[in-house]
Image (tube, rainbow, N blue to C red):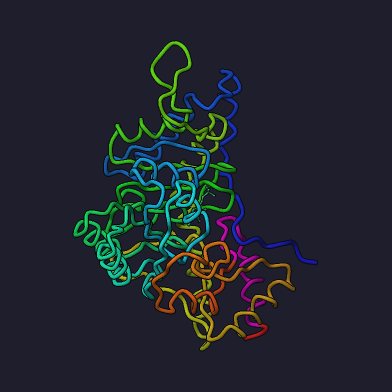
Amino acid sequence: MHKKIWLSSPHMGGTEQKYIQEAFDENWIAPLGPNVKGFEKDLENYIGNTSYVATLASGTAAIHLALILLGVKKNDVVLCQSFTFSATANPITYVGARPIFIDSESDTWNMDPILLEKAIKDHIKKGTKPKAILVVHLYGMPAKMQEIITISKRYNIPIIEDAAEALGSQYKNQKCGILGHFGILSFNGNKIITTSGGGALVCKSDKDKLKAIFLATQARDNAPHYQHSEIGYNYRMSNIVAGIGRGQMEVINKRVSQRRGNFEFYKKKLSSLPNITFIEEPEGLFSNRWLTTILSDSYETREKIRRALDKENIEARPLWKPMHLQPVFKTYESYTNGVSEDLFQRGLCLPSGSNLTQDDLQRVINGILSVT
Ligand SMILES: *Cc1c(COP(=O)(O)O)cnc(C)c1O
């Protein structure tokens, strides 16, 4: 059997252990310390636009804190992109709010601004004005932010930007993560850079960042004893984990070009096939191409390819199953247009790690060509 080719596996840059060693040398084995501050600075400099970043235990924790900071409460309504990973939607239920799922448009596969506005109008009429818009840059492709920001301003509803898959992606020369009121990042094991597990909340002011850190460290009041006036969380990133992040930030640009290189390779080798298409970058959008995805002409072709790759010990996965089709969310309202259901039927994620070799990529191509 050939060695396993994974969808997206961790890829260390080489200097991560130096930062971890420093933490050990100084005995900073705590959820605080110089690596946390250093990693936050690295991210702020990278994202730019005067961003203020709080590093946390996960991207999911970052979404939870963003909802709290926006004052989303029990029985509130949050408009959430349906075509995404469940981690986008789960935190809405943590605060007792209700997700309403919005389908995608077919240019970027992200939230459809037309359906978004329709949902807002309907709910304002019903007296349940939505409290937040949760938009995702899926697979690294930026959403139609200008349209969504215009709607956000028109109705005065803040945006949480789920950029978990989109570190390094750009919307009209601005980095994803700082385009909404809050942005979230993930450093889970399969993301474009990883700290083994971790995330970050991107804020637009130091005040919001400090409030996020306050909530993430058990909401301790300023007193010599332990005093609390608010419910807190244990969501801060540890200084060891942040050391991995500092090493990874030294190679982020390289990782983006390697992932984009995978996309170019697949496209070159497969674009002559009549039954496979690729999603292109609309004008002004720059994707980090976290995962290369293909669309086949039918569910049957998709499954044929997936099974052929599986037989060759190559991991490939269908695109995300939309939230409005998930058993756990079946009681919630949704605004659909068939786009995400169709993508789920016909789409496949190909191995996309930045550490794939030319031989690995060729094996994937051979697997696909054997059945198409
Ligand atoms: C990975 C991911 C998250 C969650 O991040 P974690 O760090 O794993 O909690 C959220 N949204 C999307 C779209 C993701 O891909």
**Residue 82 location (% of width, % of height):** 45, 66
Describe residue 125's horizontal placement relative to residue 67 as left or right.
left
Measured along the vertical axis of the image, is residue 218 above or below residue 116?
A: above
Outermost left residue: 154
For the point 55% across and 21% down, the residue is 28
Q: Which of 46 and 54 is in front in this view?
A: 54
Tell me which segment is drawn in magenta.
Answer: 351-369
Q: Nearer the viewer, residue 304 or 210?
A: 210
Outermost front residue: 126
Describe residue 5's horizontal placement relative to residue 125 as left or right.
right
Describe residue 263's horizontal placement relative to residue 302 as left or right.
left
Q: Does the magenta segment cover residue 368?
A: yes
Measured along the vertical axis of the image, is residue 265 above or below residue 274?
A: above
**Residue 186 location (% of width, % of height):** 49, 48
Q: Quadrant of the N terminus?
A: bottom right
Q: Quadrant of residue 104?
A: bottom left
Measured along the vertical axis of the image, is residue 20 above or below residue 92?
A: above
For the point 60% across and 50% down, the residue is 10
Describe residue 336's horizontal placement relative to residue 271 as left or right.
left
For the point 56% across and 24% down, the residue is 30
Q: In which quarter of the image is the C terminus?
A: bottom right
Per the picture, the main secondary structure of the magenta-coloured stretch is helix
**Residue 99 location (% of width, % of height):** 43, 59
For the point 48% across and 16% down, the residue is 226
Outermost top residue: 224
Q: Nearer the viewer, residue 278 or 333?
A: 333
**Residue 140 location (% of width, % of height):** 43, 60
Q: In which quarter of the image is residue 348?
A: bottom right
Marks counted in the figure total: 0
Outermost right residue: 1
Q: Does the magenta segment cover residue 194?
A: no
